[in-house]
Amino acid sequence: MSPTAFFQQLVNGLTLGGMYALVALGYTMVYGVIQLINFAHGEVFMLGAFLGLTILHLAARIGVGSSAIALGLAFVGSMAITGFAGIAIERIAYRPLRHSPRITLLLSAVGMSIFLQNMVMLLYSRDMQPFPRSVHGGFDIAGVIIDNIQVLILAASLALMVGLDLLVQRTRLGQAMRAIAQDLEGSLMMGIDANQVIRLTFLIGSALAAAGGIMNGLYYGGIKFDMGFIIGIKAFAAAVLGGIGSLRGAMLGGLILGLSETLLVAALSSLGVPEAFDYKDVIAFALLIAVLIFKPSGLLGERVAEKV
């Protein structure tokens, strides 16, 4: 692989990794607070993408001429609606079962995932929906082509991740999240409203997933009702890779997974492996299996005291 090709794949990998990290944060936040693997989170990502598409269509219909304003409305509107959808999911599917065996919660999550997927399929279509290419252009640095959409995704992902990290580390809400993550009963005795904190955790995680869904639509140019399954599994793998329950671990895991996919697929392609692109999904699962075997706590999993 030439140096130019390497740096090109590096940019592509960071772009992909930023989207994975946003979704992985939702998994790790919920797990950190209530020790639940929310397998419906991939469908929340998909729901956010479709809501963003709907808002873009509405903006075009009412005559919003600026693509930047329309895209801004799509991000804000979709993140807000999907955030409240996350609260509804927690209230309907998880809170009544909070003290039930974990397998019951797992089945509830799978059921909610199937419900969301089929709801979107019935409301929209089972076919791929084209996503408006609202960001155009790019630039060339020594042969490495960087699209403006990649700059937008990287900048927005970084801003959201830094903002979340500051919220968890520097605010009273973040302190309450960390307290519940460490000792739920103790935090209740200290007067923390656990239900409110858990609601806000689902709201924030779902809003971040919605942002990732819109970025995915912008990057690939299309969205589909079942797109949340694979990216949900990959984001879960990224959260496990970084150490599920650790915010910074989820960010690191997402970036590593995105880079691994693009660089290894490019390496296989340069070696003449036929249809090398088809191996990109295998890489995520291979990483997940390797982490579970050799370091089940993940790369930053030992920092239990600072999880969420």
Image: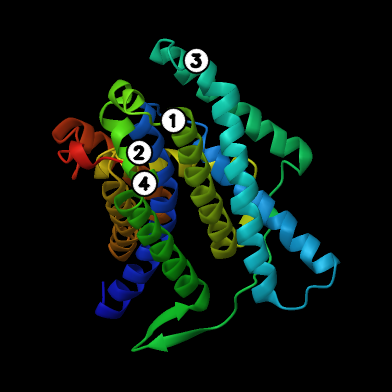
The residue carrying pointer 3 sits among few (fewer than 14), some (14 to 19) or many (20 or more) residues within 10 Å by Cα, namely some
Q: Say which amino acid is labelled 2.
A: Ala
> Mark 3 touching mark 1, by CB under 8 A?
no
Q: Label 3 vs label 2: CA separation?
A: 22 Å
Identify the image quadrant of residue 246. Answer: top left
Instruction: Give the residue number, with chain letter if any, for mark 1.
Output: 193
* Sequence-earlier tag: 4 or 3: 3
- In the displayed structure, 182 sits above or below 280; it is above
Would you place residue 7 above or below residue 212 in this image? below
- Lower sequence index among marks 3 and 1: 3
Question: Which tag is nearer the camera, tag 4 or tag 3?
Answer: 4
View extreme (right): residue: 62
Residue at image mark 3: 97
Q: Identify the residue at image location x=18%, y=31%.
A: 293
Amino acid tagged 3: Leu
Question: In terms of depth relative to the viewer, which is nearer, 174 or 99?
Answer: 174
Does the residue at mark 1 contact the one at mark 2 (Cβ under 8 Å)?
Answer: yes
Given this view, does label 3 or label 2 mark the residue nearer the observer?
A: 2
Q: Is residue 111 something one can see in this rendering?
A: no
Report if the CB atoms under discs 3 and 2 are less than 8 Å apart: no
Label 1: element kind: loop
Q: Which residue is mark 4?
A: 172
| Quadrant of the snapshot with the C terminus | top left
Q: At label 1, which amino acid type do we have?
A: Asp
Tell me if label 4 and label 2 are in contact, CB under 8 Å: yes
Find disc 2 in the rendering and name its residue: 176
Q: Residue at x 35, y 38 (%)?
A: 176
